Amino acid sequence: MSKKRKKLKSPIDTMIVDLIMEHYNIQMLQGKKESLSGEEFMELVVLAEQQYYEDVLTDVKVGMA
């Protein structure tokens, strides 16, 4: 039996995953071995956080709440 669970999805987690995929795609297109260091991951996390807060600050719907 399979129960459907409501999956909670964090917008910032989605942004991080998208940035990681972009990172790997760029490396692949450049003919490099796909890798992601801990430092590079943290840079992506900071970038995602900045993008998220920028989106929140410029979203009219959130500003009206």
Image (cartoon, rainbow, N blue to C red):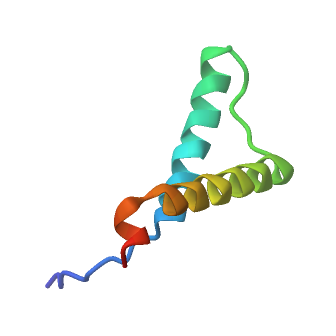
Q: Is residue 29 left or right of residue 39?
A: left
Q: Is residue 6 left or right of residue 12?
A: left
Q: Is residue 45 left or right of residue 1?
A: right
Residue drawn at x 80%, y 46% as measured from the top left: 40
Image quadrant where one finds the N terminus: bottom left
Query: Which x, y percent locates residue 35?
Result: 73, 38
Residue drawn at x 48%, y 57% as measured from the top left: 14
Query: Which x, y percent locates residue 41?
Result: 75, 52
Residue positioned most to the left:
1
Query: Which x, y percent locates residue 61?
Result: 34, 66
Image quadrant where one finds the C terminus: bottom left
Residue drawn at x 60%, y 52% as measured from the top left: 51
- The mark total stands at 0
Q: Which quadrant of the figure has residue 54?
A: bottom right
Position above or below: 30 against 5: above
Position above or below: 3 against 31: below
Query: Which x, y percent locates residue 58?
Result: 49, 56
Q: Is residue 7 left or right of residue 40?
A: left
Residue drawn at x 63%, y 24% as measured from the top left: 26
Position above or below: 55 against 30: below
Residue positioned most to the front:
64
